Amino acid sequence: MSVLYEVPGPRARRLARIVSVVVIVLLVAGVTWLVVQLALPRTTATGSVQPGLLDPSRWDVLRDLAVWRSLGRALLGTLSMAGVAAVLALVIGVLFSFGRTARSAFVRVPVTVVLEFFRGMPVLLMMFFILLVFAAQAYWAGVWALAVYNGALIGEILRAGVAALPRGQREAGLTIGLSPLRTRLLIEFPQAVRNMLPIIIAQLVVLLKDTALAYIIGYDELLNTVRSLSNFFGNQYFFSLFFVVLAIYLTLNLLLSWVARFVAARTGPNAGRPRIPRRGVHPQGTKH
């Protein structure tokens, strides 16, 4: 079976090993430098010297169960905002995609103008707009701002997915007697969703991270809770609390990114196809 690349020769393999060693050494040196910098004593603006950020005295606050209960409530608030906004964004995205691809210019042009307007408006500015103009609560201001902004992006993603389909898909639906709307719903749209699902999930990862902007409008999400806890227990604990929240966000985002890669492998164009073995290597791993 032919392959699209040549097996690396001895020089290429040696160069790859050298580059890998250099990168590993640089990463270890960078992490070591960062740890040393964090462990050094800190001098405040008043001239007093405080322990380094890795000193145990800065982390004993994590033994307080009240801290974890507060972080748990903030995490639930963050997930609640992200979950509701994600559902609304998917609905809005579907509506935008249908309006954006409508055959009538009286529908397509206004929808395009509105969509481009929402895509160009910053999420934080939209949060403030909803909060002040509609006198909404901080939670709903964050939810609707995230839903409308990401819905506009998802609408463009779905429109691109429909446009990427072969023209024969639509013609086949019309040939068997389906109306243009039913052709879009039953033939084109399901395929576009399947092809664009990894990108949509990646956009939902961005939506989850953007919930941190709700801190500015006073919603009790993770960052706002860290600020409140550091004010209550003392600013010396801000780094440790921030580090915990950073670990929570990384865990959530890496989990969603893994889901996106898994979906891409299952629904992409190469899904279900056998892997092409390298030249000279049997699929079970034995060499010819």
Image (spheres, helix red, strand yellow):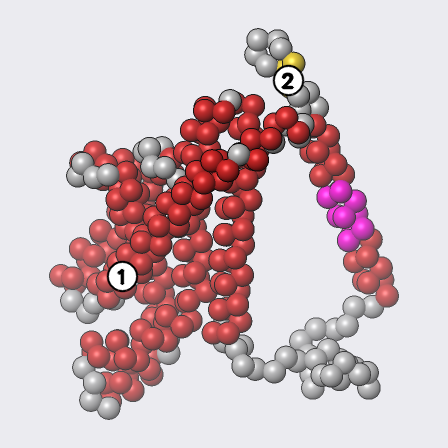
Three-letter amino acid code of the residue under disc 2: Gln
Furthest residue toward bottom: 176
Dominant secondary structure, magenta: helix
Residue topped by disc 1: 91
What residue sits 27% from the left and 61% below the top? 91
Q: Is residue 211 magenta?
A: no
Q: Position of residue 75 (x, y in %)?
A: 43, 45
- The residue mark sitting in front, 1 or 2, is 2
Residue topped by disc 2: 50
Q: In front: 229, or 14? A: 229
Q: Position of residue 112 (x, y in %)?
A: 24, 56
Q: Quarter-wise, where is residue 49 in the image?
A: top right
Q: Secondary structure at mark 2?
A: strand
Asked if 219 appears above or below 158 in the picture, the reply is above
Q: In front: 84, or 30? A: 84
Determine which of the numbered discs, if any, sits on residue 186 in the image. Answer: none
User: Counting residues from the N terminus, which is met first, the one under dot 1 or under dot 2?
Assistant: 2
Furthest residue toward top: 46
What residue sits 26% from the left and 58% below the top? 92
Left or right: 39, with 190 as reference point: right
Three-letter amino acid code of the residue under disc 1: Val
Boundaries of the magenta span? 19-28
What residue sits 23% from the left and 62% below the top? 95
Residue 155 visible, this angle: no
